Amino acid sequence: MTARGLAYVVRAVGRKIAKAHRAKQTPHGKQTVKKLMAHGTSTNSLELSGDTKLFDRVARKWNVDYAFYQTEPGKYLLFFKSEQADAMTACFSEYSRKVLDKAKSRQPSIPEQMKQAEQQLAKEKPQKGHIKEAVHGDR
């Protein structure tokens, strides 16, 4: 056996050991409901409607284990471990604050801005027919 063949075998064994090690660890952060239930702890749930990506960013910061279950389009059940209720409360309050701030500072989209500008122009600019009447009426 050559050194290259031996190195290949050692790397393959190392990969297999690492894979077995990862399989034994419990997952953290966002996961499926099935994996969350497999942790062996009790869980709670909250209703969440809105931006799940924003919640993901906040939840990573608070290091909580959670899972989404979609009940209908745009509405989710948020499952989390009962032992992490305090962290989840803090996480959810920060998420709520960010959602409210985002709603307050929301600027209208470009098509909405175009419609508003069009409406303003229509109000400010008199109709062409009225201009002709005003010009011909003065004679």
Image (cartoon, rainbow, N blue to C red):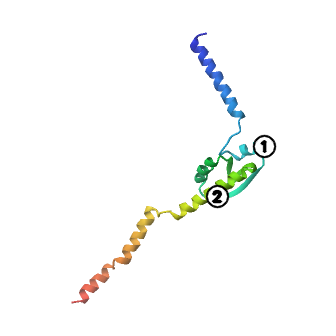
- Count of numbered tags: 2
Q: Identify residue for label 1.
A: 40
Q: In what element is the residue under mark 2?
A: helix
Taking the spot 50% from the left edge, 62% from the top edge, the residue there is: 106
Identity, as a three-letter code, of the amino acid under mark 1: Gly
First of labels 2, 1 by sequence position: 1
Query: Residue 17, how many percent across, how many down?
Result: 68, 26
Q: Quadrant of the C terminus?
A: bottom left
Look at discs 2 and 1 and give the one toward the viewer: 2
Closer-to-camera residue (38/70): 38
Name of the residue lying farthest toward the top: 1
Closer-to-camera residue (115/79): 79
Residue 127 relative to residue 53: left or right: left
| Res 93 visible | yes
Taking the spot 70% from the left edge, 33% from the top edge, the residue there is: 23
Query: Residue 92, how many percent across, how many down?
Result: 65, 56
Residue 120 relative to residue 94: left or right: left
Label 2 to label 1: alpha-carbon separation: 27 Å
Query: Residue 131, how many percent across, how many down?
Result: 28, 82
Q: Identify residue for label 2.
A: 93
Query: Residue 31, how many percent across, how many down?
Result: 67, 45
Q: Is residue 42 above or below residue 131?
A: above
